[in-house]
Image: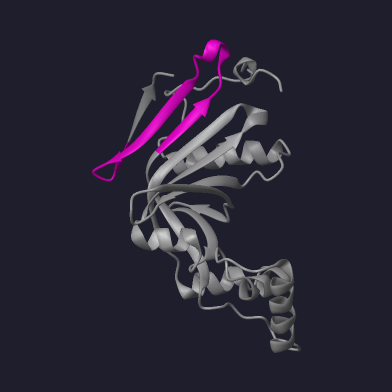
Amino acid sequence: MKNISGIRTEYMLQTLDEHDVQADPIEQFKIWFHEAHQSKIEEVNAMTLATVDANHHPHARIVLLKGVDEQGFTFFTNYNSHKGQQLSDSHQVALVFFWKELERQVRIEGNAFRLTDAENDEYFLSRPEESRIGAWASPQSTVISNRALLDQHVEEIKKRFEGKQVTRPPHWGGYRVEPTRIEFWQGRPGRLHDRVQYEKIRNVWEIHRLAP
């Protein structure tokens, strides 16, 4: 195996100045997300979601961003999953986007709250039928004996909804992460990266440069 400590990349592409960013971090995120999407980055909406459980143990996994507006960042999951249970224990979460092709990272901290039934239904019905069936068939995060059991569940759900629209299961829905802190990171040479942080203080976003 190659010496892991010797693996390094020199970041050279762009700069980030705290005087040039948008006053609202959501607007700044939209600009960066658009540039990432235009760069043909695969899974551009993939983000790490970090949660904590009732014992304050951290957990992290990759999920997909499904919307962003002035209120925050949305994603969907099974409410009975490990992440759903952890979000019931604590609303505090962190999100991380890493777009290596642009040498950029965005870190988001905030609180996650469930979406309304109407919002959940609207998105669920926009999904491919196979994904809607999967939401019913998978007891997400529970131990199962083998793959055949999951396939059996899928066939049972197909029969249940044969000739009918596959509606949303009650245990499936979305969350909106309402941010309190957002950091934009731009890789720079010599590990002297540009870091610009937004922090919401008394409902006003304050902008600061952080040392790398």
In this rendering, does residue 128 appear at all? Answer: no
Image location (x, y in percent) of residue 104: 57, 29
Which one is in front, 94 or 184?
A: 94
Image location (x, y in percent) of residue 145: 65, 69
Q: Please name the residue shown 64% across and 28% down the image.
A: 102
In this rendering, does residue 63 appear at all? Answer: yes
Q: Quadrant of residue 150?
A: bottom right
Which one is in front, 111 or 126?
A: 111
Which one is in front, 190 or 15?
A: 190
Q: Looking at the picture, does residue 76 appear above or below residue 28?
A: below
Residues in magenta? 182-205
Q: Main secondary structure of the magenta part?
A: strand
Image location (x, y in percent) of residue 25: 44, 39
Quarter of the figure that contains the N terminus: top right
Q: Please name the residue shown 43% across and 50% down the image.
A: 51
How is the protein colored in the picture?
A: one colour
Q: Please name the residue shown 74% across and 72% down the image.
A: 148
Q: Quadrant of residue 105?
A: top right
Image location (x, y in percent) of residue 35: 64, 36
Q: Is residue 33 left or right of residue 56?
A: right
The count of marks equals: 0
Q: Residue furthest top?
A: 190
Q: Looking at the picture, does residue 185 appear above or below residue 64?
A: above
Q: Looking at the picture, does residue 82 appear above or below residue 19?
A: below
Residue 199 falls within the magenta-colored stretch? yes
Quarter of the figure that contains the C terminus: top left
Q: Is residue 183 left or right of residue 130?
A: left
Q: Please name the residue shown 68% across and 30% down the image.
A: 101
